[in-house]
Image (tube, grey):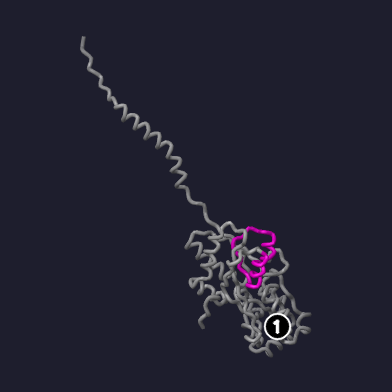
């Protein structure tokens, strides 16, 4: 009978076998953990409510901030004051979800006094001036002096101003200083929510007054210019951290960026003067 060839079997030493089993087991366990660790981090997000005067500047700055930091900005809008539901004080009174608010400084101070904005977080961002506009194609009335502005107001068929900081000043102070309250108030309208420029552009008012930065964003109007310096009302637009924000550090970082020299060119382009530095001519 032919002899069988011997069979050879590789025998792994016991210690090596145990080591391999342990290694395979660890790999099986760690693979899901590794997959979890490599998932994209949750997108960071900040909710900001800004009033009209700083809106144009904010949108441009927010886009740059998102690119530079990866923080996603969710922006909403509302006037600094007034009775509309969109007004920032009314939003905070309802404890809406927000991290940062940007509005006229007088309004921000009231919110801080009420405990709705964290004390010590308030920072001025831009200084805003009031301008006058007429419908595109209409002649530009003279408003270069108080007397010229008085004449323009008296002769206008209809006048509009906002229900925010600039309009409150015009209605309660400027008309009185010019001595034309009785002539102008009956044909004047305080406009809630809608930009005054849109009221002028659609022919609902012959002339309109609002922050220059707000008028600059409206099509179909001609900006005549700023009201005279002796009658001008400079409004600081300021930011603060909402008291109940769960993202206090991130909110402060955004405000620091908005008030930094990096923001000055965009703030100027929007029609405002940077609050931390006098605008260059």
Quarter of the figure with residue 8:
top left
The N terminus lies in quadrant: top left
Q: Is residue 235 visible?
A: yes
Q: Image point 45% across, 47% down: which residue? A: 38
Residue 249, how many percent across, how many down? 53, 60
Q: Decide which of 43, 246 is in the foreground and name it.
A: 246
Q: Image point 69% across, 90% down: which residue? A: 147
Looking at the rendered structure, the number of numbered marks drawn on it comes to 1
Q: Decide which of 147, 244 is in the foreground and name it.
A: 244
Question: Within 10 angstroms of label 1, few (less than 14), some, or many (20 or more) residues?
Answer: some
Quarter of the figure with residue 273:
bottom right
Q: Residue furthest left?
A: 2
Quarter of the figure with residue 112:
bottom right
Residue on which the image places disc 1: 174
Residue 277, how many percent across, how many down? 52, 78
Residue 142, how many percent across, how many down? 65, 88
Q: In this view, does 83 lie to the left or right of 256?
A: right
Q: Image point 55% across, 62% down: which residue? A: 251
Q: Image point 50% across, 65% down: which residue? A: 64
Q: Decide which of 24, 252 is in the foreground and name it.
A: 252
Q: Decide which of 25, 122 is in the foreground and name it.
A: 122
Q: Is residue 2 magenta?
A: no
Q: Is residue 95 magenta?
A: yes
Residue 194, how many percent across, how many down? 68, 70
Magenta residues, start to end? 88-114
Task: Report helix, strand or loop for mark 1.
Answer: helix
Q: Is residue 222 visible?
A: no
């Amino acid at each position: 009978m032919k002899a069988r060839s011997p069979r050879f079997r590789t025998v792994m030493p016991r210690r090596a076998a145990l080591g391999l089993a342990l290694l395979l087991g660890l790999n099986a366990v760690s693979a899901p953990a590794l997959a979890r660790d490599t998932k994209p981090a949750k997108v960071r997000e900040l909710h900001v409510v800004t009033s009209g005067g700083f809106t144009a500047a904010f949108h441009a700055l927010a886009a740059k901030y998102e690119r530079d930091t990866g923080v996603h900005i969710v922006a909403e809008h509302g006037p600094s004051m007034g009775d509309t539901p969109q007004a920032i004080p009314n939003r905070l009174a309802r404890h809406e979800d927000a991290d940062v608010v940007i509005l006229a400084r007088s309004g921000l101070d009231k919110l801080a006094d009420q405990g709705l904005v964290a004390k010590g977080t308030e920072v001025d961002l831009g200084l805003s001036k009031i301008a006058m506009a007429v419908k595109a194609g209409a002649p530009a009335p003279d408003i270069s002096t108080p007397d010229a502005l008085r004449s323009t107001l008296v002769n206008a068929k209809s006048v509009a101003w906002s229900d925010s900081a600039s309009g409150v000043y015009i209605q309660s102070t400027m008309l009185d200083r010019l001595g034309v309250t009785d002539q102008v108030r009956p044909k004047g309208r305080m406009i809630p929510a809608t930009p005054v420029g849109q009221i002028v552009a659609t022919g609902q008012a012959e002339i309109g007054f609002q922050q220059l930065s707000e008028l600059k964003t409206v099509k179909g109007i001609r900006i005549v210019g700023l009201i005279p310096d002796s009658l001008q009302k400079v409004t600081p637009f300021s930011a603060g951290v909402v008291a109940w924000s769960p993202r206090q550090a991130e909110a402060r970082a955004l405000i620091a960026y908005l008030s930094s020299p990096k923001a000055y060119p965009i703030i100027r382009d929007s029609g405002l003067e940077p609050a931390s530095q006098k605008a260059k001519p």
